[in-house]
Image (cartoon, rainbow, N blue to C red):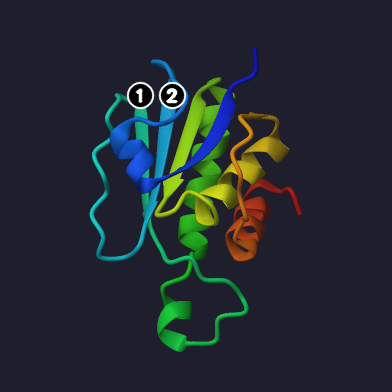
Amino acid sequence: MKPWIENIGLKEVRDGYHHDAGFNSMLIQIVDPGTEFPKPKYHFKEVRQFFFLDVDDSDHDKFYFEAAITNEDAKGIAEALQHAWDNSMNVVVHCHMGVSRSGAVAEVGTMMGFRDVGNWRAPNPMVKRKVMHYLGLV
């Protein structure tokens, strides 16, 4: 069976409100700069962590734009997704609310072939585009 991907919020990872990822699983954590990563309630085989704000091309405030996803972040997320896919790992990805940044990563994952668990999302277009670029999907 194909591995799945799920986007959730910070509170849900801490409280364990997500599908059972099993032993062969990866947690991708995305938090705002200066925020601590929440300790997940359940164990994940691998954890990848990233700091960036939920910023897209329409944000013109220099401070916020400078804290947007970097090319290095996008490449790291793309590599994490590819590693998870190559190793048939289920993926739980979280950001603060579990909708935009994590939603973009989950949507790219479904484009790669991960099964979608059906959580609502409003993907951040910049995150989605940059991660897709590093996976060769654009």
Q: Earlier in the sequence, mark 2 or mark 1?
A: 2
Relative to residue 31, is residue 92 depicted above or below? above
Quarter of the figure with the N terminus: top right
Depth check: give the residue in front, 74 or 95: 95
Residue at 53% x, 52% y is 99
Q: Which mark is residue 25?
A: 2
Residue at 66%, 59% in the rendered image: 129
**Label 1 CA crowd tier, 10 Å (few <14, some 14–19, many 20+):** few
The residue tagged with tag 1: helix, strand or loop? loop
- Quadrant the C terminus occupies: bottom right
Q: Where residue 51 sits: x, y (%)?
A: 36, 59
* C-alpha distance separating marks 2 and 1: 5 Å
Name the side, left or right, on which 55 lies relative to 57: left
The amino acid type, in three-letter code, at marker 1 is Lys
Crowding near the residue tagged with mark 2, few <14, some 14–19, many ≥20 C-alpha atoms within 10 Å: many
Residue 117, image x, y percentages: 61, 30
Q: Residue 13, relative to residue 114: is it above or below?
A: below
Q: Position of residue 7 (x, y in %)?
A: 52, 41
For this orientation, the residue located farthest to the top is 1
Residue 9 got which mark? none
**Label 2 sits on what residue type?**
Ser
Tell which of 17 and 70 is nearer to you.
17
Question: Residue 137 vs residue 118: left or right?
Answer: right
Question: Is 99 on the left or on the right of 13, as rendered?
Answer: right
- Quick check: marks 2 and 1 in contact, CB under 8 Å? yes
Q: Secondary structure at mark 2?
A: strand
Name the residue beneath numbered marker 1. 45
Residue 26: % across, % down: 43, 30
Q: Residue at x 65, y 45 (%)?
A: 108
Residue furthest to the right: 138
